[in-house]
Image (cartoon, rainbow, N blue to C red):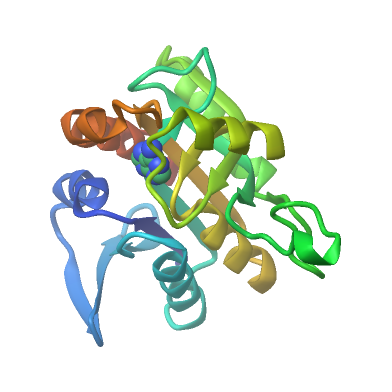
Amino acid sequence: MKTIGIIGAMKDEITPLLQHYKNYTTIKLGKLEFYKITLEKEEKILYITQSKIGKVSAAIAATTLISKYNCQQILFTGVAGANHKDLDIGDLVIGNKLVHHDVDITAFGHPKGHIPEIGIEIDTSEELNKIAESIIKEKNHNYKVGTIATGDQFVHSKEIKEEITNNFNAIAIEMEGVAVAQTCNQLEVPCFILRAISDNANGDAPENFEEFVKQSAIKSSEIIVEMIQLI
Ligand code: ADE
């Protein structure tokens, strides 16, 4: 049996998956919950979890999925703010590189986002990214593959977006991806980060997010469901 871990930060980001698979058992670990799904025919076990928002939460979820539930691949599904002129609400972003936009040890001469012995950019699985891209292409969705910037803040200003653009070549902004990618990278487990755009990380972002989070999260989870059949 192949074991795959799936993370979403918010309830809206994992609910479409639980609704799709229907039959799951809930495993409690402290305050965390893991939803176990056995796909007999496909010979796969899925563990879905809602990490909660932010980098620490996401790293806890990824670490637990890998080291306690032996997940051999980690997929992240959710929403993000757009940081590219050709990305609009509902479009999809595959993060082939993830960066910490809020890590700052420039005081010691390092560039923004650099972590000693790790670097700035953390790669995700080329193989998983290619599979997702083929599914997305077939569905004719607008999408981009590129760098996603992660930080512990909901970005809703032109100035911060500009700063992130100047420091990193990031096309989308969210709050968990790099933590999952870094955990997977350190533990040597393939990682995949998918986001559907819920807002433009500008002044309208809070209202746009409220309005579009559910439908964008569904769009991202639909790709995950198809990926599960192919991986
Ligand atoms: N997730 C969705 N939109 C976001 C934004 N604007 N900033 C950070 N995370 C997000």
Res. 59 in view: yes
In this rendering, the answer to whether 95 lies above or below 48 is above
Q: Is residue 7 left or right of residue 106?
A: left
In this rendering, the answer to whether 123 lies above or below 158 is below
Nearer to me, 84 or 92: 84
In this rendering, the answer to whether 190 lies above or below 13 is below
Nearer to me, 223 or 111: 111
Q: Quadrant of residue 197?
A: top left
Res. 230 in view: no
Specify the farthest residue to the bottom. 30
In this rendering, the answer to whether 181 lies above or below 85 is below
Relative image position of residue 69 (x, y in whole percent): 42, 78
Q: Write the residue at 51% across / 12% down.
A: 86
Q: Quadrant of residue 68?
A: bottom left
Relative image position of residue 165 (x, y in whole percent): 63, 31
Relative image position of residue 44 (x, y in whole percent): 40, 60
Q: Is residue 223 left or right of residue 127?
A: left
Q: Is residue 122 left or right of residue 34?
A: right
Q: Is residue 16 left or right of residue 92?
A: left
